[in-house]
Each structure stands twice: as structure tokens, then as C-alpha cells.
Image: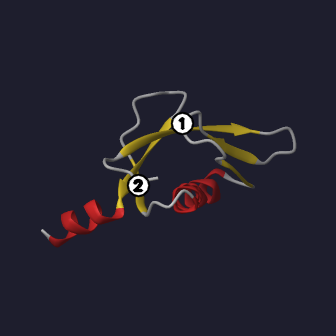
Amino acid sequence: MTLGRSEIIRVKIERGKAGLFYATSPDLTGLIVGRPDVDALFEAVPQAITELYAAMGTDVVVTIAKNDDPDFYPWVAIPAEVAARLAAH
């Protein structure tokens, strides 16, 4: 998979019955992350997104975007080569 442009991955955060917090996404099949607190979850989500893209053959840099949606947290997957060019300027 080659990512030609940045993609938004909407992530839904929910609290499970056992007290863990879970992150899933309708935009990225296979994304499910569970952690005991929201802070730990927010630290783990970008790594999980990066690993899923890597498994599909694409290197990305992941960052959170401005949140206007009360149901989802938007994360942005930026192709690594694009991020490198931007960082060089």
C-alpha cells in the first residue's frame, strides 16, 4: 500500500465494562488499543496506527488533529517522505 497523501483516521474512545479504555476506528481496520487510562491510550494510539500502516507496507508519521467531532478523535497519518520534506523546510 502506498499512501500518496495524508489520511484522517477517526478514533473512537470508549470505556469497557472491565474499566479499560479502548480505541477503535471505522477508518482503519484492525485498530483496537486498550489501556487502563485515557492518557496511556492517547500515547499508544499513534504507535498502533504507525504499526498497522507499516504492516501494509507504508511508513507514516502520526499526529493528532484539531477535534471538532464529539464522537471521534481525528489522527492524521502523513506519509513519512512528506513529513521529512516538511521538516527539512
Residue at 60% x, 56% y is 39
Figure quadrant of residue 49:
bottom right
Residue 33 in the image: x percent, y percent?
69, 52
Q: Residues within 10 Å of mark 2 (few under 14, many from 20)?
A: some
**The residue under label 1 is which amino acid type?**
Asp
Name above or below for residue 26 compared with residue 58: above
Residue 8 in the image: x percent, y percent?
41, 40
Instruction: Point out the residue furthest to the left here.
Output: 89
Nearer to the camera, 84 or 46: 84
Q: Secondary structure at mark 1?
A: loop
Q: Which residue is mark 1?
A: 27
Q: Residues within 10 Å of mark 1 (few under 14, many from 20)?
A: few
Nearer to the camera, 86 or 63: 86
**Left or right: 68 as drawn, with respect to 43:** left
Figure quadrant of residue 42:
bottom right
- State the colouring used for the structure image: secondary structure
Residue 50 in the image: x percent, y percent?
51, 60
Instruction: Point out the residue furthest to the right here.
Output: 18
Residue at 87% x, 44% y is 18
Q: Which mark is residue 46?
A: none
Label whose residue precedes the other's in the sequence (2 or 1): 1
**Left or right: 27 as drawn, with respect to 23:** left
Image quadrant in which the C terminus is located: bottom left
Residue 16 in the image: x percent, y percent?
80, 39
Closer to the eye: label 2 or 1 = 1
Q: Which residue is mark 2?
A: 63
Residue at 74% x, 39% y is 15
- The reply to whether discs 2 and 1 touch (Cβ–Cβ < 8 Å) is no
**The residue under label 2 is which amino acid type?**
Thr
Q: Secondary structure at mark 2?
A: strand
